[in-house]
Image (cartoon, helix red, strand yellow):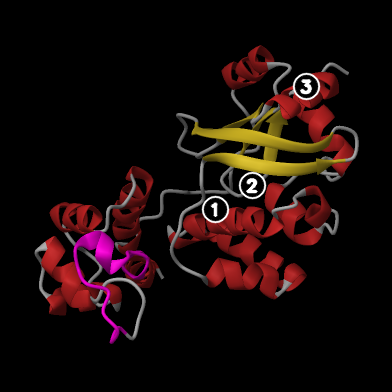
Amino acid sequence: MAGSELGAFLRSRREAVAPAEAGFPNGSRRRTPGLRRAELATLAGVSVEYLTRLEQGRDRRPSPEIIGALAEALSLSADETVHMHRLVKSGDGRCQWAGPPARTVRPTVRALLDRLEPAPAIVADRLGEVLAWTTGYERLAAPVGLLDVRPPHLARFVFTDDRARTVYPDWERVADERAAALRAAAALGDPYAADLAKELTAAAGASFGDRFTAPGALPGYTGVERWAHPVAGELRLAYESLELPDADEQRLVVYLPADDAASTALDHLTAG
């Protein structure tokens, strides 16, 4: 799967680049969006034939130099470049996960959560299961139903709980993010992410399945979410997601008010 994933990722990133941004005329005869293969090949200094083999999954072992040249030509972010390198390793049959995600959090990480109070903050695993959270997060998330199921799960809530579409006014964008996170893990050979994807496809149908099968963008690790909160009203919450130094790829996610109104509402909510 990973060889085709590398090709699909490359193709999706090529099609996302506006020709004008790369110095090529838009023209009226373009049949596909983004750059043509010949244009990307020119920018990266590779042959069109070789780029075709990569995109079709017939060459799964490009060198780090080739990946670097393609990443520069496509103006990829650091996260996207790292993802491409990891897809190459997965294409060699090397899966970095020997077992299911750990369901424990290091004591030092729990101590860090305590230090973050009363800010809403969580530690989640690579599949979206919430392993630990602050009291501030409980006061934010419990009234909307996100903590009704234990252990809480970010992706399952978004795709299988009807309340999610009310909680997140921008549900479509949040759903894109949750599906992209699972796809990124599954693309790297994680069988547990693939199994969860099958479960969510069966439960949610096309609303999840179409998002999961669409190659391309990685999840955003920083941004703003809008919540329609039953107690605090509408909240604009900025979030920062930081990968913890652990082979299991747990992430610390902290929510902060994105404007003065959210700051006041969040202060009242998390003060208990």
Q: Quadrant of the C terminus?
A: top right
> Which residue position holds label 1?
181
**Callouts 1 and 2 close, C-beta under 8 Å:** yes
> Which residue is at a point 54% across and 35% down the rendered structure image?
241
Q: Nearer the viewer, residue 138 or 57?
A: 138
What is the spatial separation of the Cα atoms under label 3 and label 2, in whole angstroms? Answer: 29 Å
- How crowded pointer 2 is (Cα within 10 Å; few <14, some 14-19, many 20+) is rated as many
Check residue 128 in the rendering and tell me which mark sits there, or answer none: 2
Segment tinted magenta in the rendering = 13-30
Q: Quadrant of the N terminus?
A: bottom left
Q: Is residue 216 found left or right of 10 in the rendered image? A: right
> Which residue position holds label 3?
264
> Which residue is at a point 76% across and 42% down the rendered structure image?
227
Instruction: Point out residue 150 in the picture as x, y percentages from the top left corner.
Output: 81, 42
Give the mark nearest the N terminus, 3 or 1: 1
Vertical order, 191 against 206 (above or below) = above
Q: Amino acid at mark 2?
A: Gly
> Which residue is at a point 73% across and 55% down the rendered structure image?
158
